[in-house]
Image (cartoon, coloured by chain):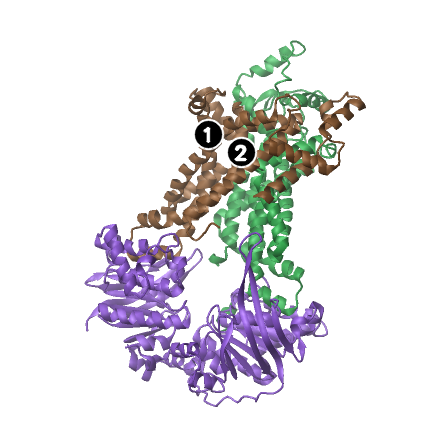
Amino acid sequence: MAAVLDVTPESAWTALLRRLQQDRVGAVSLGIVAAYLVMIFFAMAGWLAGGWSEEVGVPYANPAFLGERPNLEAALQKRSEHKGRVPDLRDIDPLAPKYEEWAKRTGELKSTQRERSLTLPWGGDRWGRDVLDKAIKGSQVSIAVGVVAALCATLIGTLLGATAGFYGGWINDFLEWLYNVFTSIPGILLVFTLAAVLRSGPLAAVFASGIWTVVIILSVTGWTGMYRLVRAEYMKHRSREYVLAAQAMGASGLSRMFVHILPNVSHVVLVQLSLLVVAFIKVEVILSFLGLGVPVDMVSWGTMLSEAQTELVIGKWWQLAAATLFMAIFLTAFSMLTDSLRDALDPRLR
Amino acid sequence: MVPTLAGVVLLIFILFKLFGGDPAQILAGQVASQEQIDAIRHELGLDQPWYVQLGIFVREILTFDWGKSWITREQVSTIFLTRLPATLTITIPILLLEAAMAIPTAMLVAYYRGTLLDRSVMALCVAAMSISFLVYIIVGQYLFGFELGWFPVQGWSDSFWKNLVTYAPLPILLAALVGLAPQTRLYRSFFLDETKSDYVRTARAKGLSEPSILRKHVLRNALVPVVTNISLLIPGVFVGSFLLEIFFSIPGLGREIYLAVNRSDYPVIQAVTIYLSVLTMLINLAADVLYSFVDPRIQLR
Amino acid sequence: MSALVAVRDLKVSFVTRQSAVEAVRGVSFEIPEDSTLALVGESGSGKTVSAMSILRLLPENAVIDRASRVEYGGENLLGVPAPRLRELRGREISAVFQEPMTSLNPVLTVGEQVAEVLRLHRGMSARQALERSAELLNEVGIPEPRARLRAYPHELSGGQQQRVMIAMAIANEPKLLIADEPTTALDVTVQRQVLELIARLRERHRMSVLFISHDLGLVGELADAVVVMRDGVVRESGPVERIFRAPQDPYTRALLACRPRLDARPRRLPVIEDFMRGQPIPSEPLERPDAAEPLVEARHLRKEFRLRTGLWASRSLLAVGDVSFAVSRGRTVGVVGESGSGKTTVALLLMRLLQASGGEARFDGTDLLKLKPSAMMGFRRRIQIVFQNPYASLNPRRSIGRTLVEPMRIHGLGAGEDERYRRARQLLQRVGLPEDAMQRYPHEFSGGQRQRIAIARALAVEPEVLICDEPVSALDVSVQATVLNLLLELQESLGLAYVFISHDLAVVKYMADEVLVMRSGEVVERGTPEAIFRSPQHEYTRKLVEAIPRGLEGRLH
């Protein structure tokens, strides 16, 4: 009887940390994710990539390691300044209404002229902005959007799922109906619909800037998976004997729901939360590309990629490469970390 | 399905009513006089109480009569019917191709579980999943369209077969390639879950070889979650197809609704959303029927 | 008699990412031809791993030591190439497992699954194989075998599923049948029939059976020879008569003694420690108080469940029909029944964890079923429950200390937190656990220890009535005895009234002063334990009593 008692007692969370440390892939992934977080912190504080929007180089400045490459575009643009009109494509170009706005904003940003360098560490974009700085600042925006939206979706999904699973009955029927409604509308259509009403409706002014439009769109469309999972867990745990024992003790419904059951399903929530972060970052990229994501005065991996399509055709691949690499390394590390987390939390492996 | 559909209609109605802009304002433009706005308002029934408006909305849905697009003045029903075929021409092959590639790959790596092959395929999948769909499209279009010239860069025709053979293959291949990694990973886990079950031990005790256990016993069981997953995937496939339509200039619903969002063309958005939701529900119903074939424990009522 | 299979110095370890655990540590035994050998032991004894090593049907992380040998017909089964092993599996050596429901493939018909093994080893055509499958189903006693060929496993009862497994196993007239706890997952009355079937088939086909079980009583009825295992080693082996009549090893003696006997009611059950340390075996008879004013009285309890069958339609399912009983201080009423008899529902109704559809549950004169939730709080303190599964009944994310203190806090017992923690430590001591268990978490304890913690939690609010819902069913036999002893001791010192629910007739007979036999929600018989055992009136009770394994006295021949 005493044999089992000679190990030091540990809570579920300390055990989790210990197991993660033993998993080499998990530890490396954790390191990479932590490095990104430090980078984001520096970017937020303005110590890093603070001047991402300044036009420090010539248009499409070559990366430092390709300094010798001819840069026709920069030369061309210099010559064509002040002469020649761009043909009017406003009728067929979906982004046409944006141009004026963009021009105005770029005008504001272009405050001081200074010496433009011919090369930049990882090249420059159409306006000569430093691609590396953009990628760092873009990481901050994309990851922030993913994490904040995932937290919101998790909150909605967990609350509704816990309520439906724990109480059952008509509450469950109602929430199931709501779930069915939200999942019957293909996600992208709901996104489009929300984007349409949020941008043209009375709240348009409120959401004109900042990341909140994307966050709302993502969390309103993304809570369903979490709801389903948490509901199933609560249905399972509701009639577990430890919960019945708590009820027999006189513990209230809310206490059983959040104090007793929630810690026991928290690992499911945590894993799903990290999956949501990955998914949301990927969706944000697509939304920003479609012009429905972060506003134009911000930079994210998505806005970088949307510039990359035209750049690639004229051989300027560095912005595409930078955004893809920054995103792929983070998402790979984060996914691997999620996998390790899932393994470490798997009760069957204990 | 009826309560769900009612919910979808209600949700769309509320969203546009509560959060959407004033249609009369949008229709009339920036420089309209108050009289013009009032006239449009009366024409659309916007001066009626909300339940009458809901009634009008429901009637529009049921009669398939949404009037004209606010921008292009085309009949909304015509827009929907003429754009749907292009969307289906690429979504259905994407779904089929994904499943046809992912299931055998998953089975193969599940058979070699724990080996170097398994681990490298899985690592490759994670890496492949970390790259944005956009990058696949941008690079794929550039490489196979511009550089190598194997496929047309973009375009569409009126002939279904010409589309399927000439214009659709590149977008379909790109989407299927993107879907391959996550699905292989998922299906592998389904197969692995099944190989741990007791009936597999029974099959081994009978003297069956591992390949035939996988083929005769595991596959049928693993198909149950696979079918569920495919029916769950269907709404998601539209994301891919919409993006492809935009990139490859394919005149499908995705491109149409994208244009509509940018122009605040409400009738088009509403019609496409509701009818595609109905389509999704019908496909799910079909999946339930398919389900009862795969799993004898599920009885249709 | 020559040996059919000889297992020599078998060592098996399980390797995980962090460590390797040796589950079987040098086990040897021989299975003679045309006879039954039983491997007996509690959980963790390595009996199943030893048996499954013969067919190499071990989990993927199991490693068999290279020096180990399993000899069969001049071959070492642990060394033969995989194709040869597959030839033997299902044809010369076959197996039946514990859980028939999961051991059959849910998406294939019974016919397909039985026919598969015939086609594989006999090269029969599909038609011939189905024909033969029907005969086999008939032989294992499945009614209407031809119609059953097209059934799916979930359409059969547990007993029938196990019969199908047996049909598959004997299809190719194997020389050896390995039966791994084949009756453990079944109801007691069905257990007996399946056991008889195995004995009959063994004799008819002149095959050998390796029978794995935790239940010595069962083994005594069936086996010719017995191997007793504990912690991965063989403690004792020999012919069944010698093992039962003259056990040499103290562990064997303990296993034989710690099950409650039907013919005696000692004050305390003997436990393993008594034998291992050579302490005197308790024999003092149990003294019970006489019936007095009832503390809890259930009258005509009734529970219907409504099952939704469609959007508007529903049908009702009667879980408990009409159950009445009374229990006074210091006494125990026992409720016996198989799965689906409604016995657990009765417990939940009394605790108001389920809302009753009718009847009364009087506690000290007050009907609990009609109380408002606020008024019920006061009674929650006085009536408590201990559940069957000690693995599910403790919150895995809470330290034992928090688990014990919470009920006191809810009911405002103790002057403050310090006082409550002091009382929690006393409770642990009371149930025989060290004080330092306070900071630990449930997964660090064994099943028996967890059940002690669950009992301590119930006692934390100083109840007068304790409902025990199968409190020892999930525990090993030797641990069962210690928990039953604890319950009896607590009853004696605290004057608790017990409602003791179990499927195990022998345990109920030992614990209870009055017994109710339940079947499909109805009480079919009630009386003193002695009367029920001596002269059962109802046919169902008689079947239950007959189904109790009796070791050598109940031999199947």
Measured Cα–Cα span from mark 1 to mark 2: 12 Å
Picture coordinates of residue B174 (x, y %)?
Answer: 47, 30
Q: Which residue type carries mark 1?
A: Ile
In the rendered structure, the colour chosen for chain A is green
Chain (purple): C
Picture coordinates of residue C58 (x, y %)?
Answer: 35, 59
Q: Which residue type carries mark 2?
A: Phe
Report the disc number at residue B238: 2
Q: Is residue B6 left or right of residue B39?
A: left
Element marked by disc 1: helix
Report the disc number at residue B172: 1
Of mark 1 and mark 2, the one earlier in the sequence is 1
Chain letter of mark 1 equals B
Q: Residues within 10 Å of mark 2 (few under 14, many from 20)?
A: many
Chain letter of mark 2 equals B
Q: Residues within 10 Å of mark 1 (few under 14, many from 20)?
A: many
